[in-house]
Image (cartoon, rainbow, N blue to C red):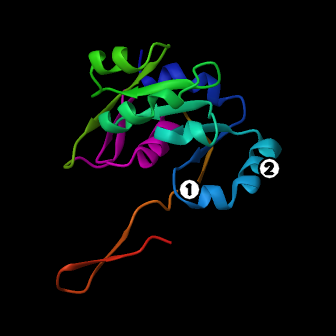
Amino acid sequence: MSLAISLSASCLISGFIFIIGNGPTISDFKEHIFQYIEKYRPITMGANNIGEFYHPDYHAFTNRNRFYLFSKSIDAGKSKVLLGAYLTKHLIRTHYKGPYERLMYAHDNEAPFGIDDGVLLASCRSIGALLIGVALAMGAAEVNVVGFDGWLHLVNNDRDIDYLPAY
């Protein structure tokens, strides 16, 4: 069964999805985030070590190292678990014993972003960006995000790339 078909029924509950990234501002705005969730009751998604902050409706992993490090933060009683198609069965069985669904995506740097028969086509190194695609595949009417501030901004001044501190 494709991702779009298997997950879309749950999206009809509220019509929109709230994706919580792992950026440093989620700690600064923790109370606002929880108030937002309480008020609007969106379907929530998060990834990697988000389980230490909040247990979303969908907890996703695509990176082997992050799965190895943070799989213990999964609470399968609170979150449906989405595991990337490129995580090996051995890795999963070794570090996680609960139920999960495969997050089907084709990492293709040449193809434009798209959804083909429930499979996301993306050049997404970031699980947060990939989760936006998952939300769209689920048929979300609206997608809101928070905490997507955890990476460095790059500036090219016609010379070497300069790294600016994340804010």
Q: In the figure, 62 relative to 92: above or below?
A: below
Q: Looking at the image, which is closer to me, 48 or 143?
A: 48
Q: In the figure, 99 relative to 105: above or below?
A: above
Badge 1 or badge 2: first in the primary sequence:
2
Which label number is shown at residue 117? Answer: none
The residue at the point 18 percent across, 80 percent down is 160
Secondary element under disc 2, as helix, strand or loop, is helix
Instruction: Determine which residue is flagged by label 1.
Output: 147
Horizontal side of residue 158 vs 57, given as left or right: left
How far apart in space, not on screen, are marks 1 and 2 (Cα)? 15 Å
Horizontal side of residue 77 vs 153, given as left or right: right
Q: Looking at the image, which is closer to me, 144 or 21?
A: 21
* Amino acid type, residue under disc 2 in the picture: Gln
Q: Is residue 62 visible?
A: yes
Find the magenta span and give its range. Answer: 111-137
Instruction: Determine which residue is flagged by label 2.
Output: 35
Horizontal side of residue 123 vs 27, given as left or right: left
